Amino acid sequence: MEKLSFKLNAPTRAGGTRAQAIVGVVASGNLEVLLERASPADVCTIDIATAAHGFGAVWDAVVRDFVARRAAGGLRISINDGGARPDTVALRLAQGVRLIEEREA
Amino acid sequence: MTAATANSGSLSWYEASARQRIEALVDGGSFNEFIGPELREMSPHLSIFDLPEQFDDGIVIGRGRLDGSPVLVAAQEGRFMGGAFGEVHGAKLTGLLRAARKLKQDVVILFDTGGVRLQEANAGELAISEIMRAVIEARRAGVKVVGLIGGRAGCYGGGSLIAGTCSSLIISEEGRISVSGPEVIETNKGVEEFDSRDRALVWRTMGGKHRYLIGGADKFVEDDASAFRQAAVEALRGRGRCDLAVLDAEQQRLERRLRRFGEAGDAVAIWQAMSIDKPTDIPGLPTDEFRRRVADKREHADDAR
């Protein structure tokens, strides 16, 4: 496993009141994303454990793009990755912030 | 809560994730997870093999309401390591079943598993026996344990043994139950014994229709979450007895079944021996017509299993 950690300034605070959300599954070409509310509202931390080594620069680009575009402030995001492509990662991250915004049933 | 409020919309059970299945199974918004992903209770073995872990170790457990009544639920995620049982995965299910016995609350297990996780084989095998014991102890205490089978991974290996201890089993055509999987049989016995690439052979030997016909499953449903939910509600209304008389009766039925079909070389030969009209049509029949056509022909396990 390769472990990567990012602590990024997030311009937009995550919406909603859910304490946590989880999307995706750890499988080949897929990943799970666990989102929890933590840290200051203008910071997003992302910890990644990935089966595919040597893609730090791609992860860096994907998570920076995510934090710039989506409401990710105040989130602690943890990822278990089974070798997903960058577009799948971006999709799961977007699903994650969408789910944590949802009203609790 | 008054009437059950199921989540609307049709959802393929086969395609759905463990979490989606639970969401669609229980009354809307009633599910409370135990030992959720945020606790990161993961396998202690996978990192040794440098394999990716999952925060819930591939099984979601908790409590919800089904048609208004409290029920304990476990759902395996078939896409994570083939839904296989490891130490933590197994311990979560064992714990749920022991709680069921104490609380006198029924359990629904959403199977989706290839069996024991090879990387933690000893712990996984032990988990299977602990779970089987816990199912029986819960059933002896009057708790019903209903198994739902219709996922991608089917219900194989140790999972099929656990299924065999349940009060009742609900299966879809896509569901499969077998101790050994197709590839395992082919590897050990050769392609002439079982060609694992012959999908039609796999499904007519291990698939939901055949299991339902020979009394290996009790309810046959469409690959749809609401159909599974409805069948689970009905199964939980059953008697779910578990005593010596019930087990004796099942033993006799299985002996009879072996005498009746033991010489058959293929599932179709068994369906023929059951006097099913046009047995070769069975795999192609839609759910309703299939159930209608076999209603008075199929074998029943009653509540022995």
Image: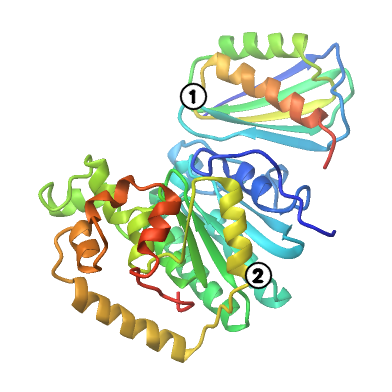
Which of the pair B122/B92 is nearer the observer? B92
Quarter of the image with the N terminus of chain B is bottom right
**Considering only vertical position in the picture, is B191 above or below B127?**
above
Q: Give, as a three-letter code, the residue at label 2.
A: Asp
Q: Residue furthest bottom?
A: B245
Rendering quarter of residue A89: top right
> In percent of the image, x 75 and y 13: which residue is there?
A67
Any mark on residue B82, and which? Answer: none
**Marks 1 and 2 belong to one chain:** no
Which of the pair B155/A37 is nearer the observer? B155
Q: Which residue is mark 2?
A: B106
Q: Give, as a three-letter code, the residue at label 1.
A: Gly
Quote the CA–CA distance across marks 1 and 2: 39 Å
> In percent of the image, x 52 and y 62: which residue is there?
B147
Rendering quarter of residue A48: top right
B130 on left or right of B265:
right
Any mark on residue A83, and which? Answer: 1
